Image (cartoon, rainbow, N blue to C red):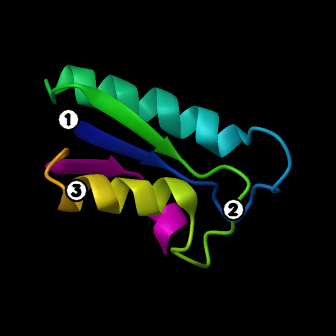
Amino acid sequence: MTALYCCPSQDDGVDGVSNSIQSQRNILERYAWGHRFPNPRFYVDDGYSGGSFNRPGFQQMILDMGNGKTRTIITNLSPLQ
């Protein structure tokens, strides 16, 4: 499985589905399929601050990686900074 991780940019608010999340989903999905990464799965943390890694989607992705369910993570790095 390939993890596609999306979280809001600092420019987005925390209410509703952010524009950056939708944009990230589109870009990451096209990238994964275009480069033949197997079984893409989204992990999304919309509505959570990018200032902390204590986010449910991020934590589940790390857990799945540790359990060997996924070997590759693809993300937009700017929301993680």
Q: CA distance from mark 3 to mark 1?
A: 9 Å
Camera-near label (2 vs 3) is 3
Q: Residues within 10 Å of mark 1 (few under 14, many from 20)?
A: some
Q: Which of the marked residues, 3 or 1, is nearer the chain's N terminus?
A: 1
Residue contact between numbered discs 3 and 1, judged by CB atoms under 8 Å: no
Horizontal side of 74 relative to 6 (left or right) equals: left
Q: Which of the marked residues, 2 or 3, is nearer the chain's N terminus?
A: 2
Regarding mark 2 in the picture, which secondary structure is present there? loop
Residue contact between numbered discs 2 and 1, judged by CB atoms under 8 Å: no
Q: Is residue 72 magenta?
A: yes
Give the residue type that dot 1 points to: Met
What label sits on residue 1 in the rendered view?
A: 1
The residue pinned by badge 2 equals: 48
Residue 8's spot in the image, x, y percent? 64, 55
- The residue nearer to you, when weighing 63 against 53, is 63
Give the magenta range: 71-81
What label sits on residue 65 in the rendered view?
A: 3
Residue contact between numbered discs 2 and 3, judged by CB atoms under 8 Å: no
Give the residue type that dot 2 points to: Tyr
Which quadrant of the view contains residue 17? Answer: top right
Horizontal side of 76 relative to 63 (left or right) equals: right
- The residue nearer to you, when weighing 52 against 75, is 52
Q: Is residue 55 magenta?
A: no
Regarding mark 1 in the picture, which secondary structure is present there? loop
Residue 70's spot in the image, x, y percent? 19, 46
- At a point 35% along the width and 23% down the height, the residue shown is 30
Residue 26's spot in the image, x, y percent? 48, 27
Horizontal side of 6 relative to 21 (left or right) equals: left
